[in-house]
Image: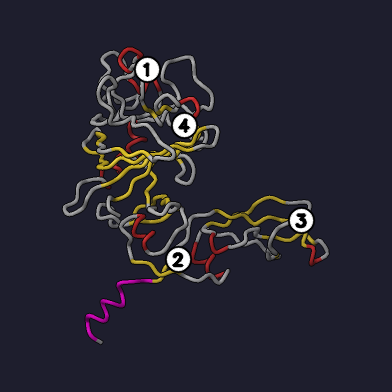
C-alpha cells in the first residue's frame, strides 16, 4: 500500500462525539412487571449521556411521552465508550485532535457541551465547554454565572488557574486565556462575545474583535465592538472619554492590586476579580462600567456603590452571564 494512502487512512478516526450530559438511573414501579420496583434511565436518547449515576426513587410511575427501558440492575459509569457500547450508539467521524470548538462545529456537531480540544499551546488537550447553539457557533465559553452557588470572590492564583463547574458557573483561567490568545502568524486572532440575561428573561449581547489577554498581569485587549441589533448590549470595555475603560487594564484581585485607583483595591472594594480601572464614585462616574465577576444577586445591593454583577446601568437585573471566544473568520 502506498505511503500516501496509509497517511490518508490515519488522518481521520472514529471517536464518540457527544455533548456532556449527566444522566441518572431512577427506581420506580414497572407497569409491565406488576409494578415491581425496577431501575430506569428516563431519557429519550441515552446516547447523549456521558456520565450515568444513581438517582432517586419515584413511588408512582411518571407519565412520559416515550417508553423507557426498565432494568433489574442499574448501570453507572463515567466512561463514554461503555455507555455507547451498552446502548449501541453510532459514532461520528471527526478530525483528530480538533484545535478548537469551531473545528468540532465544522465537523457537523451541533450539541453544546464539554469537549477536549488540542490547540498548539495544549498539545495534550484541554477540556472546555463549547457553545454550538448559533449558526456561527463554536465558541469556547470562559466565564459563566447562573446562580450564587459558586463564589467569584477568589484569589489571584484561583483566577489564574480557573475555578468552578464548567457546565454551570465557572472561570476558565487567566493563564488559559493568555496562552490561547497569543498571536499566531497567519491567523486573524479572536472574537469575544458577552451575553447577559436579565431577570425578565430577555438577553443582550455583543461581540468584540481582536480579543487578547497578555502579560504576567493578564492585560485585557479588545477592538471594535458590534452589538446585536435586536438585543443590543452596551460597550463597557472599550469606551473612552469620561469613563475609564477596562481595555488595556491588567487583572486585579483582592490579593493583587493592579487597578488605576490610587486609594483602594477595586476587587477588594467591589468584590470579584476583573479588569478594573477606577472604582470610586468620583473616579468611576455614573455611566457605563463593568464587573461580571461581582457578587451574585438578583436584587440591588445598596450598601455600596457599584456592587453586584455590573454591566452598564442594568447591573441589579443581571441573572446570567456568559463570556466566550472564537477565532475570527471562523
- Label 3: few (<14), some or many (≥20) within 10 Å? some
The answer to whether residue 7 is magenta is yes
The answer to whether residue 241 is magenta is no
- Residue 152: x %, y % from top left: 43, 31
Q: Circle 2 is placed at which residue position?
A: 16
Q: Earlier in the sequence, mark 2 or mark 3?
A: 2
Q: Circle 3 is placed at which residue position?
A: 61
Q: Circle 1 is placed at which residue position?
A: 286
The residue sitting at 39% across, 26% down in the picture is 312
Q: Earlier in the sequence, mark 1 or mark 2?
A: 2
Q: Nearer the viewer, mark 1 or mark 2?
A: 1
Element type where label 4 sits in the image: loop
Tell me the quarter of the picture where residue 290 sits: top left
Q: Nearer the viewer, mark 1 or mark 4?
A: 1
Q: Circle 4 is placed at which residue position?
A: 151
- Label 1: few (<14), some or many (≥20) within 10 Å? some
- Label 4: few (<14), some or many (≥20) within 10 Å? some
**Measured Cα–Cα span from mark 1 to mark 4:** 26 Å
Q: Residue furthest bottom?
A: 1
For the record, the magenta segment spans 2-13
Q: Is residue 111 left or right of residue 257?
A: right
Amino acid at each position: 500500500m502506498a505511503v500516501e494512502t496509509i497517511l490518508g487512512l490515519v488522518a481521520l478516526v472514529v471517536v464518540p462525539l457527544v455533548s456532556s450530559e449527566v444522566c441518572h438511573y431512577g427506581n420506580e414501579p414497572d407497569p409491565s412487571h406488576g409494578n415491581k420496583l425496577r431501575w430506569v434511565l428516563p431519557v429519550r436518547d441515552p446516547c447523549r449521556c456521558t456520565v450515568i449515576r444513581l438517582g432517586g426513587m419515584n413511588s408512582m410511575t411518571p407519565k412520559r411521552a416515550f417508553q423507557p427501558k426498565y432494568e433489574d440492575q442499574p448501570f453507572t459509569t463515567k466512561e463514554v465508550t461503555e455507555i455507547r457500547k451498552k446502548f449501541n450508539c453510532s459514532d461520528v467521524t471527526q478530525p483528530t485532535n480538533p484545535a478548537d470548538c469551531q473545528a468540532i462545529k465544522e465537523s457537523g456537531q451541533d450539541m453544546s457541551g464539554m469537549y477536549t480540544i488540542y490547540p498548539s499551546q495544549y498539545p495534550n488537550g484541554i477540556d472546555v465547554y463549547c457553545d454550538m447553539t448559533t449558526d456561527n457557533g463554536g465558541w469556547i465559553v470562559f466565564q459563566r454565572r447562573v446562580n450564587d452557588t459558586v463564589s467569584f470572590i477568589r484569589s489571584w492564583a484561583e483566577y489564574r488557574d480557573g475555578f468552578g463547574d464548567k457546565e454551570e458557573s465557572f472561570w476558565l483561567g487567566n493563564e488559559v486565556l493568555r496562552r490561547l490568545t497569543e498571536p499566531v502568524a497567519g491567523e486573524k486572532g479572536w472574537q469575544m462575545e458577552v451575553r447577559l440575561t436579565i431577570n425578565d428573561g430577555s438577553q443582550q449581547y455583543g461581540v468584540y474583535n481582536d480579543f487578547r489577554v497578555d502579560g504576567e498581569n493578564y492585560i485585557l485587549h479588545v477592538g471594535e465592538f458590534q452589538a446585536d441589533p435586536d438585543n443590543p448590549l452596551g460597550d463597557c470595555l472599550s469606551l473612552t472619554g469620561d469613563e475609564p475603560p477596562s481595555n488595556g487594564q491588567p487583572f486585579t484581585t483582592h490579593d493583587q492590586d493592579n487597578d488605576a485607583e490610587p486609594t483602594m483595591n477595586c476587587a477588594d472594594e467591589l468584590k470579584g476579580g476583573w479588569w478594573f480601572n477606577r472604582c470610586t464614585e468620583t473616579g468611576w462616574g455614573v455611566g457605563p462600567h463593568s464587573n461580571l465577576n461581582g457578587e451574585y444577586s438578583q436584587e440591588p445591593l445598596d450598601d455600596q456603590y457599584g456592587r453586584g454583577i455590573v454591566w452598564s446601568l442594568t447591573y441589579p437585573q443581571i441573572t446570567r452571564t456568559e463570556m466566550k471566544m472564537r477565532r475570527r473568520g471562523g
